[in-house]
Amino acid sequence: MAETPTTAGDGGSPPTLVLVHGAWHGGWSWDPVLPALAAHGVPAHVVDLPGVGRAPGGHDLAGHAAYLREEVARLPGPVALCGHSYGGAVLTEAAPADAVVLIYLAAFLLRPGESCVDANAATPPPDDPALGPHREGDYLHVSPVAARHLFYDDCPAEPAEAAIARLTPEHVATVGSPVTRAAWTEAPSAYIVTAKDRAISPTAQRAMAERAGRRYEIDSGHSPTLTRPDELAALLARAIREAAPHG
């Protein structure tokens, strides 16, 4: 039987894990993980950040941070937060100081004044420019071929194609905007490195992970939500449990 994460001071009830997706994705990207989280006794709340085809609100980092603050403020009881990829920047800017833990999954754990683009400088660009994002007006797009290369290189074809079909453009003022706050200096933090990642290299991730309180690794590409949902859920439950007081 899976051990249930608990937090002291709230009758032993587990915190709600707030799940924040990465750029070009939506809250749907967490769907494969939710049953496994429930099996570990982790209640989850999925955030769908504002954007094209997503929730209403500002499409930039500031708009996403404001939206996350509002989402968290509506939740009762203690919270933990997990951001995947760009979602880590949103956590860094907007997570509450009293969070049980901030979990960065292949994510941008940034210092004030630093952007996702800055922190990812250690990731070599693909040899073929067509395998990276491209700009159209104020939005960044990822082609199906680029998405397969960056996000889903270790995924089976059918679920990868289904995910690729749901990707949407992302405003340039997301990954290119610097954060103004470092929430991970105020709340406990943990980092999950994806050891075979092409979107954010393991080198770049491990450099950011040095700033976190705890570090874990998973032997996957950029999307363990899709390829290793059970293993990922177990790691998330562990991160909450190990960060909680007396956990």
Image (cartoon, helix red, strand yellow):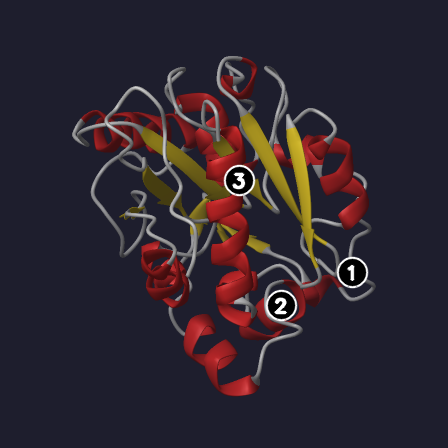
Type of amino acid at the residue the image marks with label 3? Ala
Identified at 59% across, 76% down, the residue is 155
Residue at x 33% of width, y 54% of height: 27
Q: Judge left or right: residue 2 versus residue 189.
A: left
Residue at the image point whose x is 27% and y is 52% from the top? 54
Q: Callout 3: helix, strand or loop?
A: helix
Distance of label 2 from label 3 (alpha carbons) = 31 Å
Does 33 appear above or below 113?
below
Q: Residue furthest front?
A: 1
Q: Which residue is mark 3?
A: 239
Residue 205: percent from the left, percent from the top?
72, 41
Q: Residue at x 38, y 47 (%)?
A: 4
Callout 1–callout 2 Cβ contact below 8 Å? yes
Of callouts 1 and 2, the N-terminal one: 1
**Of the numbered discs in the image, which one, if any, rests on residue 135?**
none
Of the image marks 1 and 3, the number of the one nearer the N terminus: 1
Residue named by callout 2: 146
Q: Which residue is mark 1?
A: 126
**Quadrant of image for the N terminus:** bottom left
The answer to the question of whether label 1 and label 3 lie on touching residues, with beta carbons closer than 8 A, is no
Is residue 36 or residue 28 the one in the foreground?
36
Between 98 and 5, the residue placed more toward the observer is 5
Task: From this view, report whether residue 33 is shown above or below residue 189.
Answer: below
Is there any visible trace of residue 147 in the rendered image? Answer: yes
How far apart in space, not on screen, are marks 1 and 2 (Cα)?
10 Å
Q: Amino acid at mark 2?
A: Ala
The kind of residue tagged 1 is Pro
